[in-house]
Amino acid sequence: MSTARSCAILLGKELRLEFRTRELLSATIVFALVIVVLFSFAFDPTAAESRRYGPGLLWISFLFAGSLMLNPSFARERLNDTMDALRLAPISPFAILSAKMLANLIFMSLVEVVLVPVFSVLYNVSLAGVVLPLILVLILGTIGLTVTGTVFSAISSHARLRELLLPLLLLPILTPLLIAAVEATASLFVEQPELDRTWVALLAGFDIVFLTASWLLCDYLIEE
């Protein structure tokens, strides 16, 4: 069976399992909304302050939401010994890993679809004229977040304190990505928005490096 077909089948399984209950997705959306609302009441920013501090608060919300969502990526397989069955199946280990990545990317994108309009209203940040460049930044940033988060979720899934271990492993690695994402988003929230291509290139480079690394190391990640 080809890697693409195996990935599609496993991705369908991941989506069916989540949309059947929507427990993780609903909890993540509520958690992210609570963060954005609390920040809004705590800082009560003016329009100028929102343009200045809003990008950082927005990506912090994405980071917290991602940490909550990515942590149980491999927990279901470990608990039910499904991972052993997947490893015995005639499919590529990268198909297993990429299906997890794509599922997490879809779930995080749904969270962002809900969160960004709420952020725009609460922080009085207009998205008119910057929707397409903002989508590009969100896609590149979310790919980097989900790829690294899924990889480190696989690494930490064996640990007893995996809920604590994943953020400790993830945060230092994601620092360049978060800086680039915040700066690229901030360039779109100024009075005369213009997408900073330097930070976009850094986001794309980060994604390429970690996608390539996950492809090269997928055998060890799945086996271990």
Image (tube, grey):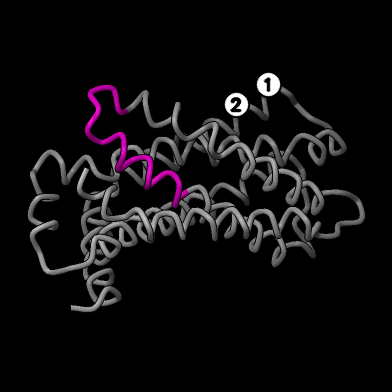
Over which residues does the magenta segment extend?
146-162
* Residue at figure coordinates x 67%, y 25% from the top left: 41
Furthest residue in direction right, as rendered? 192
* Residue at figure coordinates x 37%, y 23% from the top left: 164
- By secondary structure, the bulk of the magenta-drawn segment is best described as helix
Left/right of residue 66 with respect to residue 50 in the rendered view: left
Real-space Cα separation, disc 1 to disc 2, in angstroms = 6 Å
Residue that badge 1 annotates: 42
Residue 2 against residue 178 in the figure, above or below: below
Residue that badge 2 annotates: 38
Q: Where is residue 35 in the image (x, y as percent from the top left)?
A: 55, 31
Residue 49 against residue 14 in the figure, above or below: above
- Tag of residue 189: none
Magenta span includes 33: no
Q: Which amino acid does label 2 sit on?
A: Leu
Q: Position of residue 191 (x, y in %)?
A: 91, 51
Which of the 4 image quarters holds residue 57?
top right
Dot 2: what SS?
helix
* Residue at figure coordinates x 86%, y 57% from the top left: 193
